[in-house]
Image (tube, rainbow, N blue to C red):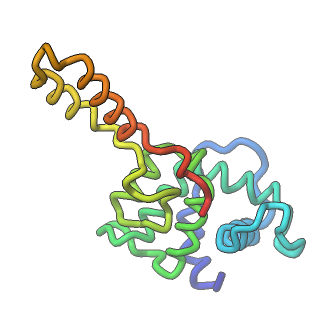
Amino acid sequence: MTDAEWAGLEPALTFGRRTGRKPANLRATWDAIFWIACTRLPWHALPPHLGKPDSAQRALRRAAQGGVVGRLLLAVSDHPRGGMLASLRWRICRAARRVARISPLGQTLMADRLGLADALPCAPHQLPMPHLSESISACVPLLRFSDRLPRLFRLLRTFHRMMTGDMRAWRCR
């Protein structure tokens, strides 16, 4: 990471309430996170000059759960409030994909709405659709009573798959 990239990234890494010790060298920690995210290797393959793998993994996990990764995704997007970290876009998206399973679902759905396909853990059509329940309640009364049960169960099973997404597809690509 260049000095200019770090100067843009550092203000975005402010954490809310923190527990535990602050990383000794925050820049080296994020260099390690980006190295792992871009190489797709396991954490234990991190070169020794980039620091300890468990420290980098813990920092990324805390950033995902604390909403920092979501703010970084917004900063690299084409959103009017974003675009500040365009040079780090691919690396931040890869890091967000790395922690998609443990980050809040809203963060993944936000990446989909912002058009950041690199940050998604699967294809966009396999993501959950949490607001689909309103569509289900509008369709169910339209069924005739004689046809209702078999068709209703098929319809609900289809809508359930659409709402929850296909978690088997959520693998690190």
> Would you identify the image quadrant in which residue 147 lies?
top left
- In front: 34, or 71? 34
Residue 98 located left or right of residue 153: right
Residue 79 located left or right of residue 53: left
Give the residue at the far right of this rendering: 48
Percent of width and height locating residue 162: 36, 41
- In front: 36, or 51? 36
Give the position of the C terminus as an image quadrant.
bottom right
Percent of width and height locating residue 28: 76, 71
Residue 129 in the image: above or below residue 110: above
Q: Residue at x 17, y 24 (%)?
A: 140
> Would you identify the image quadrant in which residue 10 lies?
bottom right
Q: Residue at x 60, y 45 (%)?
A: 102
Percent of width and height locating residue 24: 80, 62
- In front: 122, or 64? 122
Q: Residue at x 65, y 49 (%)?
A: 62
Residue 61 in the image: above or below residue 150: below
